[in-house]
Amino acid sequence: MRTLIIIPAYNEELTIGSVVALAKKYGDVLVVDDGSTDRTSEIAKEAGAVVIRHEVNRGKGAALRTGFKYALAGDYDVVVTIDADGQHNPDEIPRLVNPIVTGKADLVIGSRYLGGASKKVPLYRRLGLWVLNKGTKLAADTEVDSQSGFRAIRVTALGKLNLNSDDYSAETDMIVKAREAGLVIKEVPISVRYDVPNKHKRNPLSHGLSLLAAILGLIGYRRPMLFFGILSLLSFGVAAVLGYWGFRPYQQTGHVVLTQTIGAGIFVIIGIQFFVSGLMLNVLAKMVRE
């Protein structure tokens, strides 16, 4: 089976050459340079990769879509995606491709949890990944290493995925869309290293929050009753607290605190609106799926 290895890259001149050189043993290599301002494209070409360059930084999701479009236009059977920063070991590519070759899976995710590699993940990342993985489970009804960028997918399955995320939420979006399309998802153990250059291109907190926001959006899309039901319960909870503060002085003074009481009423109305919205969107979602 012909394999295309896609490496989305942004300012990775220190590591891109070695990643390309190691990956070339297992298929054709395409580097999608997502608007780098360093020598990423030049070094990738010298290492033997085909390079497609975005003139401006558009995000990892956009880079993956460019790579997938190239794969669909070519005569490829399998696509492998791997990060450009050297965290993943390209020699593990056959491990990801094998379940596709043997017909056991359509999408294979390299998991840091199956082989114990998660122990090398910094504690703050482990906590963040736990939250993101649980959020992805709610959105996609499957629990996997949702943020792993080391993956393999059958090219014929790519046409069934309508991916539209531009940023790092593309990894979660792919899992959700794969589940919707009825694709078989499998995990295999991989190793990972974090002693790599440029390991923090973005602030970890803002990066994690943006991913969480995107996942919450996917939960709202896939399971609107759950999403809006939780928001409704939170609104009713706030209303109960404000109502308690508002009516607490009544027994002693015969008066209520107007501000808290009005606030409680407002949050009751908001809670009802969230609940009704969830019901309506849940019915619409079922109609669309049917």
Image (tube, grey):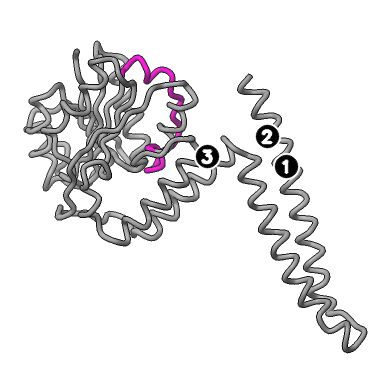
Q: Where is the C terminus found, in terms of image quarters?
A: top right
Q: Gap between marks 1 and 3, in whole Å?
A: 16 Å
User: Is disc 3 in contact with disc 2, using a CB cutoff of under 8 Å?
Assistant: no
Residue position marked by numbered label 1 in the rendering? 277
Does the image show residue 256? yes
| Mark 1 neighbour density, 10 Å: few (under 14) some (14–19) many (20 or more) | some
- From the viewer's perspective, is residue 118 above or below residue 268? above
Does the image show residue 42? no
In this orientation, which residue lies closer to the viewer: 196 or 154? Answer: 154
Q: Secondary structure at mark 2?
A: helix
Tell me which corner region of the image, top left, top right, bottom left or bottom right, holds residue 19: top left
Residue position marked by numbered label 2 in the rendering? 282
* Range covered by the magenta-colored residues: 154-171
In percent of width and height, residue 109 lies at 30, 33
Q: Gap between marks 3 and 2, in whole Å?
A: 14 Å
**160 in magenta:** yes
In percent of width and height, residue 17 lies at 9, 38
Q: Amino acid at mark 2?
A: Asn
Residue position marked by numbered label 3 in the rendering? 218
Q: Amino acid at mark 1?
A: Ser
Identify the main secondary structure in magenta.
Answer: loop
What residue is at 66 percent from the left and 40 percent from the top? 225
Q: Secondary structure at mark 1?
A: helix
